[in-house]
Amino acid sequence: MTDELNLSANQLDALREIGNVGAGNSATALSQVINRRIDMNVPKVAMVPLEAVPDLVGGPDAVVVGIFLRVYGKAPSNILFLLPQKSAFYLVDILMGKPHGQTRKLDAMDESALMEIGNILSGAYLNAFFTFTKITMLPSIPALAMDMAGAILNVVLAQLGQMGDQALVIETEFLSEDDGINGQFFLVPDPGSLETIINAVGVE
Amino acid sequence: MADLIRVGMADYKVGRAPSTLISYGLGSCIGISLYDTQAKVGGLLHIMLPDSTQARPTDNPAKFADTGLPLMLKDVLELGASRTRLVAKIAGGAQMFAFANATDIMRVGARNAEAAKKILKEMNIRLLAEDTGGNYGRTVQINLNDGVYKVKTIDKGEKEI
């Protein structure tokens, strides 16, 4: 198995480029759905100690909405799209055609709309992933939770924790033009999937 | 003001009154506290996984219930706790996302809670209270003045166990 800690600079670059194109696709899709420009940053690709992952999203007790998808196929992975509570509420306002500020908690319809956004983002992202790697990746139906970031991340971290103390994280931030919506999109390959992905990329 | 000592994921801390040990945002993880009322010393362990049988030797032992608890016990005893007076409380072990075909890893919260209880029993430490399960996150803290273990949630209120 590829030692997770010893990815070469070129391999990290390749992963960053895949993340970039994937997230670009996702940003375009999101932008079309909500009819607003969406900016994104250059993806961060890093090995992060498990216990430090919650700090990437504002600390373990920050309240966030998390949309989680399991990714099946040759390189099983996890997708987590995290929105600060305020952003999620604003996104629901837009999706449901409500005035800004009206959403204060999520009902079943709101949750369903947000999960659909998770679907759209993931589909767009994984398409790009396929173009680069020829690895078909199929997302599960999404699941949603609104809670403490640490608790939501547990679902991914516990899985990784079985195999090591580090997570390879490909992370992109989205920001709408009016700053009302920001979200973080994470692709976290299972430890065994990393080698498959790196080999498929063909970079040493 | 009394110290507030933060315990990270897969970590533990021990201390004495008037400190409070706190760990934020537990989902499937479990916060296991040990406390000696008389000596007013205790510890808080934040485990992620039930057991270390699949672990690699380089893994952090505080990640697992079976290897983390003995470590914390040793440190609490060194601070002057009595083995026979120590009592435990646990909280956490939620399943954050409901999937129709939940795999083993999705149910890790329940397995964590079982493992914590089993290991406490094997070590002959009395489990005084627990608040486990559900589908919501918890922030837990133990006040080393009185051993009160507080569990905070986002919209399920706050309780002391």
Image (cartoon, helix red, strand yellow):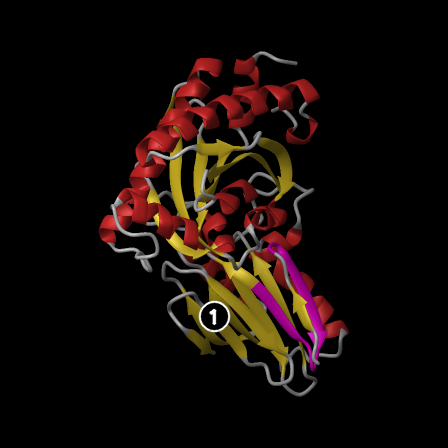
Q: Is residue A86 above or below residue A80?
A: below
Residue A121 is inside the magenta segment: no
Residue at the extreme left = A109
Query: Is residue B89 found left or right of A9 in the rendered image?
Result: left
Q: Mark 1: few, some, or many residues within 10 Å (few <14, many ≥20)?
A: some
- Front residue (pair B117, A119): A119
- Front residue (pair A26, B37): A26
- Number of disc labels: 1
Identify the magenta region. B9-23
Residue at horizontal 71 percent and vertical 73 percent from the top: B15
Q: Can you say which quadrant of the picture contains the N terminus of chain A?
A: top right
Q: Is residue A127 above or below residue B68?
A: above
Q: Is mark 1 on a helix, strand or loop?
A: strand
Residue at the extreme top = A202
Q: Is residue A168 above or below residue B96?
A: above
Q: Can residue B96 be seen in this view?
A: no
Q: Can residue A1 be seen in this view?
A: yes
Instruction: Look at label 1 and name its amino acid.
Output: Lys
Residue at horizontal 63 percent and vertical 24 percent from the top: A12
Residue A174 in the image: state x and y as whole percent. 48, 37
The subunit letter for the residue under badge 1 reads B
Residue B15 is inside the magenta segment: yes
Residue A14 in the image: state x and y as whole percent. 59, 19
Residue B116 in the image: state x and y as whole percent. 51, 62
What secondary structure characterizes most of the magenta part?
A: strand
Q: Can you say which quadrant of the picture contains the C terminus of chain A?
A: top right
Query: Is residue A19 found left or right of A95 in the rendered image?
Result: right
Residue at horizontal 58 percent and vertical 64 percent from the top: B23
- Front residue (pair B86, A112): A112
Look at mark 1 in the image and give the residue it sits on: B152
Residue A145 in the image: state x and y as whole percent. 37, 52
